[in-house]
Image (cartoon, rainbow, N blue to C red):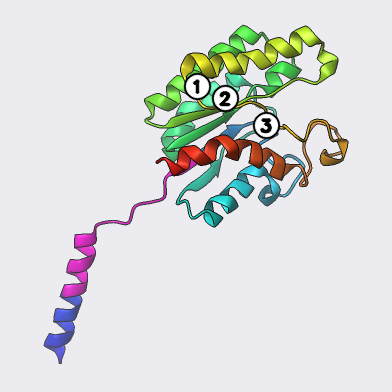
């Protein structure tokens, strides 16, 4: 009897050893500002949390890590990116920064350089970058808003990076989809943001 139990245990251990350690699901890192950090909302209402739910429903084996920080500008994002990449070792990084640079009137040339350097860092870490574009409110004037939007298109083209043209497409014109500050989408606006990202992200994941 004892011999039979011992043999069974040895067989089980052999099978576990042969199978090797289980592989963790690859990480999708969301790297943005308050628009991606579920500002003013429960964390599970933000579009990155909704992304995790959609991945599960689509039976795509990924883990979503949201490293977004409210108020972040591209220079701050660039500075902390190496540590975040080393910590999470993502397979794909969604870079959704730049809105605060625009709102503060920071130099667009520097914003562009910061975005390019983040993309280079992501690639150096053996991950794929995806860039999310933003737009400025019309009260910033047509010249400024056009130049700001063009930065994202230029970076995506020059670096050959997939681009989500505008995170808040379908939301920006609808006041009822914003919080009282008229800057951050409400819970009702978050699925629109997810859909905008998913149009570009979904095909990338299915090709893996």
- Camera-near label (1 vs 2) is 1
Magenta span? 11-28
Taking 109 as reference, is 116 above or below it? below
Query: Is 162 displayed left or right of 41 in the figure?
Result: left
Q: Whole-Å distance between the Cαs marked 3 and 2?
A: 18 Å
Residue at x-position 61% and y-position 7%: 109
**In the shown orientation, is residue 80 left or right of residue 208?**
right
Badge 1 vs badge 2, beta-carbon distance below 8 Å: yes
- Element marked by disc 1: helix
Q: Which residue is mark 2?
A: 77
- Circle number at residue 118: 1
Residue receiving disc 3? 167
Query: At 47% from the left edge and 48% from the top edge, which residue is drawn?
Result: 62
Query: Do we see residue 105 in this rendering?
Result: no
- 11 relative to 203 in the view: left or right: left
Nearest to the eye among marks 3 and 2: give it. Answer: 3
Q: Could you classify mark 1 by the number of other residues whose Cα lies within 10 Å: few (under 14), some (14-19), or many (20 or more)?
A: many
Is disc 3 in contact with disc 2, using a CB cutoff of under 8 Å?
A: no
């Amino acid at each position: 009897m004892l011999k039979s139990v011992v043999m069974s245990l040895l067989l089980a251990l052999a099978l576990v050893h042969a199978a090797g350690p289980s592989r963790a699901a690859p990480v999708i890192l969301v790297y943005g500002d308050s628009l991606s950090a579920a500002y003013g909302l429960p964390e599970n209402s933000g579009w990155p949390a909704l992304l995790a739910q959609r991945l599960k429903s689509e039976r795509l084996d990924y883990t979503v890590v949201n490293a977004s920080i409210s108020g972040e500008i591209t220079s701050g994002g660039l500075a902390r990116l190496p540590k975040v990449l080393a910590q999470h070792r993502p397979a794909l990084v969604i870079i959704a920064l730049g809105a605060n640079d625009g709102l503060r009137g920071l130099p667009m040339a520097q914003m562009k350089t910061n975005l390019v350097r983040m993309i280079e860092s992501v690639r150096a870490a053996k991950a794929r970058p995806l860039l999310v574009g933003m737009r400025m409110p019309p009260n910033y004037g047509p010249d400024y808003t056009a130049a700001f939007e063009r930065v994202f298109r230029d970076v995506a083209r020059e670096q050959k990076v997939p681009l989500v043209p505008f995170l808040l497409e379908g939301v920006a014109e609808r006041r009822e989809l914003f919080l009282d500050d008229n800057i951050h989408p409400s819970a009702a606006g978050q699925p629109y943001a997810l859909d905008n990202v998913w149009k570009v992200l979904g095909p990338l994941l299915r090709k893996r």
